[in-house]
Amino acid sequence: MAAEGPRRLRWEPLTRRAGGMAAAAPALVTEARCAQRCREYLEGARILNVSHRVQKLPDGTVALPVLEGKLTKQHLQDLRGSMAPGTTCILSWIKKPIPSKAARAQSPAQKLCGELQHLVARFGGRWSEELEHDLPHSWQRHGDLVMLSKDCFKAALWEELGPELWETVASSLKARRLAKQGRVSPDGVRTPTVSLLLGHDGWVEHMDNGIRYTFDVTRCMFSSGNITEKLRVASLQCPREVLVDLYAGIGYFTLPFLVHAGVAFVHACEWNPHAVEALRRNLELNGVQDQCWIHPGDNRQLELRDVADRVNLGLIPSSEQGWPIACQVLRKDTGGILHIHQNVESFPAKALQLPCGLLKEQSLCNGQEDSGAQRNHGSPETADVMDSVQKIQFTGTRPEWQRWAEATGAQIRFLLEKLHGEPWRINILHIKPVKSYAPHVHHLVLDLECRPLQAEPH
C-alpha cells in the first residue's frame, strides 16, 4: 500500500467494504511507525475494538480494529494532523479479523452456559431464555467445592438431565464437589439447609488472615462478612487475658483472639453440636487446642463465674440473652471489656425501648443529658444509670447507634450492680458497623469497659 498525501484521508461507507461478509471488521490502517500513536489515540477516544487483534498487513501497514460506526471524519483529521505529510491514515476493513486473547477467554459463567446448552441439546431439549435466567450468576468457592446460590436450577427440565447435569456444572466451574444453598433453618442454631449435589461429604477448609478454618458446609455457616471485625480483634493486644466467647460457632472470633491477639485462655461456648465439632478441629489445625476449653450446650446454663477479662458476644440479630451471663463471668474485682454485637435499625423516628424498662427515649438524645424537666419523666434510678455511662460521640456514628450504645451500657451497669450489690462505671470505647445486614439495618459491634468503682484509683 503506497503512501499518499492528504487525499488518503477519507471516509469509506462501511457497507462498501463489507461485501456482505458478516465477519469483516472496520479498522484504522496506518504505517507501522505510527501504530502506537494511533493506538493510544483510539484508546483515549474509547473506540479501539479490543475484541480483535491488531494485524500487520502484507504491504507492511498495520490495521487497528475500531468499533463499528465510531471512527468519525473528525477522528481521522485529528490523527492526520499529528502525522507527517504522506502518512497512511484510512478507514478500511479487515476481512478476516482475529479474535483477541481477551475475547477468546470465556468467563466461568459463559463457559457454564455453553456447556449446558450442549448438554440440553444432547438430551433432545430446547434451550430457552428461561433456562438461561435459571443459571447461577454467583457462587462461593471453598477449595474443590463450589456452593451454588439457592435461586438457580429451579426449572423442571434440569431434573431430567440426572447426575450428568451436576458433573457438567462442576467441570465447567473447575470443581470436584458441588452444593446448593437453601434457607437457614430457624432451629435456634442457624443450621444451613444445604444440599450436597456432587461429592461424598461437605467438609471444606478456608484460610482467613493466616488462620485455618474447617467446617461442613451442609451443617455450619461461614460468615465471610465479619472479616473487618475479625481483623480488628486480631489487632488487639490481650496478653495474659482470659476470654469467654459466648457464641463461639466454629471459632470466628475465638481463633483470632488466640492466634493473633495473644489471649492466654478462652472459654468457648457453643450449642450447635456440628459447630462444636468444627471448633475442635480448628483449634487443633491452628495448634491452640491447649488454650481453649469448649463448653457445649446452652450458655445460659453456664456455671462459670468471675473468670473473664473479656467477653465476646458475637450473636446477631441480638446477643441480649447473653448479657446476664457476660456480667456473671466478668472478674468482679477488676471488671473487663464486653464486645457486644447487635443489629440496629437506622430509623431516627423509631423509639428505642429496653425490655427492662430502665430508660426512656427522652434521656438518650444524641449522647447528651436532657433537661431536668425531661429527666423527671424517668425514675431517679434511670438518671443515676445514665450518669454512670461515659457518653462519647464517635466520629461517623449515627445518632441511633449512639443511643443504642448508651442504652446498652446503662442496662449492663444495672445488671452488674444487681449481681454484685455495688456501683460500677461503664465506658463506651468503640462503636462500629461490621456490615449492612438489611435496608436500614446495620450489624454493629460495641466495646464496653466495665469497672467496679472500688477498683478505680482515687
Image: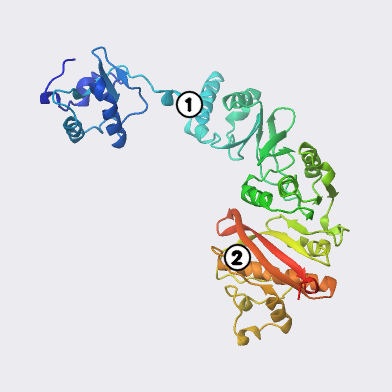
Indicate left or right for 31 with 350 as reference: left
Indicate left or right for 335 with 129 as reference: right
Q: Is residue 67 above or below residue 192?
A: above
* In the image, farthest residue toward the right: 303
**Which part of the image, by quadrant, shows the C terminus?**
bottom right
What secondary structure is marked by label 2?
Answer: helix
Indicate left or right for 8 with 168 as reference: left
Residue 433 in the image: x percent, y percent? 60, 57
**Which part of the image, by quadrant, shows the N terminus?**
top left
Residue position for label 1: 106
N-terminal label among 1 and 2: 1
x 76%, y 52%: residue: 239
Determine which quarter of the picture holds residue 30: top left
Closer-to-camera residue (78/458) = 458
Determine which quarter of the picture holds residue 282: top right
Foreground: disc 1 or disc 2: 2
What secondary structure is marked by label 1?
Answer: loop
Amino acid at circle 2: Trp
